[in-house]
Amino acid sequence: MNVHEQLDALESTLKKALKNANTKADLQDVKAKYLGKKAELSTMMRHMKDLPAEERPAFGQKINQAKQRFAALIETRRHEIETASLNARLKEERVDVTLPAPNYRTGRVHVMNQIVESIEDLFIGMGYLVKEGPEIESDLMNFEKLNLPKDHPARDMQDTFYISDDTLLRTHTSPVQIRTMLDYGGKKPVKIICPGKVYRRDDDDATHSHQFMQIEGLVVDTNTTMSDLKGTLLEVAKAMFGEDRKIRLRPSYFPFTEPSVEVDVTCSNCDGVGCSVCKQTGYIEILGAGMVHNNVLKASGYDPEQYQGFAFGMGVERIAMLKYGIEDIRHFYTNDLRFNKQF
Ligand code: DAH
């Protein structure tokens, strides 16, 4: 066999070996066998010294050319193997976007909290702070300091769960007014709303619940007037029931305010014309309010000669029921998903 034949034979066994090499490791073995130190090409190169001097350059050139061809063949095969393995991976890892997705059920904010949060946002935008107070309250804070002494007939307006003679479940959020004013030491202006749960000894029915939510508002400053109160409540009515709403104030009575008013909003169902929702009056009562009673300011350390204030209190369930046409207050607390999911 001359050199030519020898190299051709070697090349054809290399090609066969490459065809059978399917992994990078296989390829590494083939490379070692055909181009490594113990490869036949290397052995042939080492025998070059046995040749006559004039034949050596041509021989060396042939070996080197063969080396380059072999290397190129191996490189081509490496490329093929890499492409094939990439394609296999892409195929295996392909996401089938047509598969039905698992049904993740997400929770949502309860309608009560939605209303509370939107009213909070409205008032925070007007510079109010949000304050909270305890649900287990003293008779002193819940009644006495709100100008409702022990034998006051107006205590009957709020049937109370007593824990002891002077501890109770708060019947309204108004005690947070007192706590805040006491906290402020009679010196600073106050501008707060107080959302929270309240309790009354009522028999539960479509419009009564022994536990419900209120939002209280209180502003105390040296130049607070009833028109500030009216303007503020008009903003609330518009935010809750729509830009076209109007409000009216009716004289009323609360021990903690003087004068006291009941606030009505024009019925959004009939736009004030009169319908079954507003019992043909065109108006719906939404909250109680008034100018803070002098006795309340005094009991909380504020000098009525210097400070005046307005206050208001609204029932959150009532607002939600009017806004969404909900007929039974018990829906808010029975956790029927068919109800909760609608909001
Ligand atoms: N606390 C009253 C209630 O629960 C609501 C209320 C009326 C609060 C007038 C006020 C107010 O601050 O000024 O029935």
Image: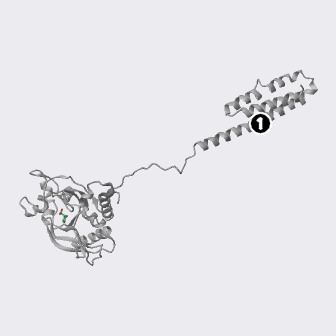
46 lies left or right of 222: right
Q: Is residue 238 above or below residue 49?
A: below
Q: Whole-percent x and y of residue 122?
A: 32, 64
Of the 4 image quadrants, the one containing the C terminus is bottom left
2 lies left or right of 78: right
Q: Is residue 47 above or below residue 27?
A: above
Q: Quadrant of residue 1?
A: top right
Residue that protrudes farthest toward the left in the picture: 151
Q: Residue at x 81, y 35 (%)?
A: 69
Q: Whole-percent x and y of residue 141?
A: 15, 56
Q: Whole-percent x and y of residue 291?
A: 18, 68
Q: Quadrant of residue 314?
A: bottom left
What residue does disc 1 label?
73
Q: Whole-percent x and y of residue 208?
A: 19, 60
Residue that protrudes farthest toward the top in the picture: 50
For the image, the number of numbered tags is 1
Can residue 179 be seen here? no
For this rendering, which residue is in front, 297 or 163? 163
User: Dot 1, how many residues are within 10 Å of its Cα: few (below 14), some (14-19), or many (20+)?
Assistant: some
Cβ(mark 1) to ligand 1 < 8 Å? Answer: no
14 lies left or right of 158: right
Residue type for callout 1: Leu
Residue that protrudes farthest toward the bottom in the picture: 273
Q: Residue at x 85, y 22 (%)?
A: 47
User: Which quadrant of the frame does ligand 1 lie within?
Assistant: bottom left
Q: Quadrant of residue 227?
A: bottom left
For this rendering, which residue is in front, 217 or 101? 101
Under circle 1, the secondary element is helix
